[in-house]
Image: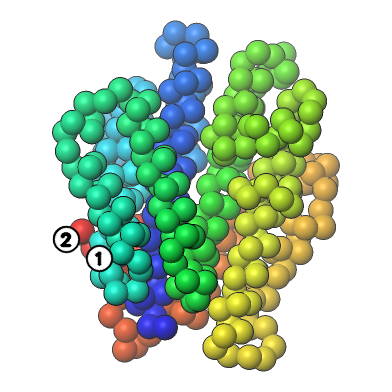
């Protein structure tokens, strides 16, 4: 497979996954705002931190209202990671490799891109906009899984989706644990419980958590579910298992032999998160553990890019580095 094709497939899925996560973040915060005291900033404080774009948000304007946050994350053209830009960049990557992806994938992504260009789309109530964005992204996953052969194209698609998903799960959990820890008297209170419920809903994990735990919501239980659960598809451990499996398949189809640096790192990270307990993570510092795994995600991305995407004879695709996405403008 050409490196530019693999690069585009990887980034199409990262961008769609990012758009879906951001739309869910905002959708849950909109709903949580109804249960918070008037004028409370609680539902909005985590969003910019979780996106990792605090500096850009400060540069673009002094506004800190809920409307400013929502616009920055969803519609701000100067924010490369806004929902509208993620869909545009995913479409541009898909346009460049239309001969590789299925017609159904291209038609859905292209159609949704043009839907978002229509003023009527943004005239809907915010909750309807966000719900439609989330469903369109989820439909793209379904179309991809239902129509794309399980060859290297699908493996690189899955790789991008999983890495983005694991990164966003750790970010939103880190924000709650590290930046929004309530005072001692508020721990276990109504607002604290609302925040943990909102966190689970943000990760699409509330119902599965309830079925798994069947007890009162506790911070340790929520953190354990989102980080260490082996069967929930958005948990960090589950994503790492599938990333390691995908990398073995990709490498095995090209260069048989002992594991390379990329496989070694993915295996070490997976082992670290498969054979630890939440009590140990919290005792040694959950923020530090999450910060470490986010660095591991960045290292994995760098190694994937160096191993499969960078070629002296390849035409660069729309594939910016994590945290500073500046891909070419969509056609």
Label 1 sits on a secondary structure element that is helix
Instruction: Check if mark 2's residue and mark 1's residue have beta carbons within 8 Å.
Output: yes
Compare residues 139 and 310 and report the one nearer the observer.
139
Q: Marks 2 and 1, how far apart in space?
A: 9 Å
Q: Which residue does the numbered mark 2 point to in the structure image?
A: 331
Corner quadrant of residue 295: bottom right
Labels 2, 1: front one? 1
Quarter of the C terminus within the rendering? bottom left
Left or right: residue 26 versus residue 215 is left
Corner quadrant of residue 133: top left
Q: Residues within 10 Å of mark 1 (few under 14, many from 20)?
A: some
Q: Which residue does the numbered mark 1 point to in the structure image?
A: 95
Residue at image position (50%, 9%) is 37
Compare residues 50 and 127 and report the one nearer the observer.
127
Residue 105 in percent (x, y) is at 35, 59
Q: Could you tell me if residue 14 is visible in this image?
A: no
Label 2 sits on a secondary structure element that is loop
Residue 195 in percent (x, y) is at 60, 24
Q: Is residue 166 above or below residue 187?
A: below
Residue at image position (69%, 88%) is 258
Quarter of the N terminus within the rendering? bottom left
Residue at image position (62%, 26%) is 197
The label on residue 287 is none
Looking at the image, tell me whether mark 2 or mark 1 is earlier in sequence order.
1
Left or right: residue 2 versus residue 293 is left
Residue at image position (68%, 76%) is 264
Residue 230 in percent (x, y) is at 74, 52
Compare residues 92 and 194 and report the one nearer the observer.
92
Corner quadrant of residue 109: bottom left
């Amino acid at each position: 497979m050409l490196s530019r094709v693999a690069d585009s497939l990887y980034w199409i899925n990262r961008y769609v996954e990012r758009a879906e996560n951001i739309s869910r973040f905002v959708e849950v915060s909109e709903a949580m705002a109804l249960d918070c005291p008037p004028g409370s900033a609680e539902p909005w404080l985590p969003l910019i931190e979780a996106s990792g774009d605090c500096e850009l948000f400060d540069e673009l304007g002094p506004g800190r209202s809920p409307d400013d946050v929502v616009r920055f994350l969803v519609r701000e053209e100067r924010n490369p990671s806004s929902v509208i830009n993620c869909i545009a960049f995913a479409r541009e990557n898909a346009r460049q490799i239309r001969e590789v992806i299925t017609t159904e994938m291209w038609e859905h992504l292209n159609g949704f891109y043009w839907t978002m260009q229509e003023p009527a789309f943004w005239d809907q109530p915010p909750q309807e906009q966000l719900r439609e964005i989330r469903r369109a992204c989820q439909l793209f996953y379904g179309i991809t899984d239902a129509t794309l052969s399980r060859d290297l194209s699908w493996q690189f698609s899955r790789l991008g989706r999983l890495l983005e998903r694991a990164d966003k799960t750790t970010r939103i959990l880190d924000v709650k644990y590290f930046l929004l820890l309530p005072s001692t008297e508020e721990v276990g209170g109504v607002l604290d419980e609302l925040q943990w419920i909102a966190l689970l809903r943000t990760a699409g994990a509330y119902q599965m958590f309830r079925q798994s735990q069947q007890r009162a919501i506790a911070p340790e239980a929520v953190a354990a579910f989102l980080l260490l659960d082996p069967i929930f598809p958005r948990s960090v451990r589950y994503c790492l298992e599938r990333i390691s499996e995908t990398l073995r398949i990709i490498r095995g189809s090209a260069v048989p032999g002992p594991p390379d640096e990329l496989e070694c790192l993915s295996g070490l990270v997976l082992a670290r998160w498969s054979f630890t307990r939440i009590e140990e993570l919290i005792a040694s510092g959950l923020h530090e553990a999450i910060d470490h795994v986010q660095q591991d995600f960045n290292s994995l991305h760098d190694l994937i890019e160096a191993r499969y995407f960078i070629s002296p004879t390849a035409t660069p695709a729309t594939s910016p580095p994590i945290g500073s996405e500046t891909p070419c403008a969509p056609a």
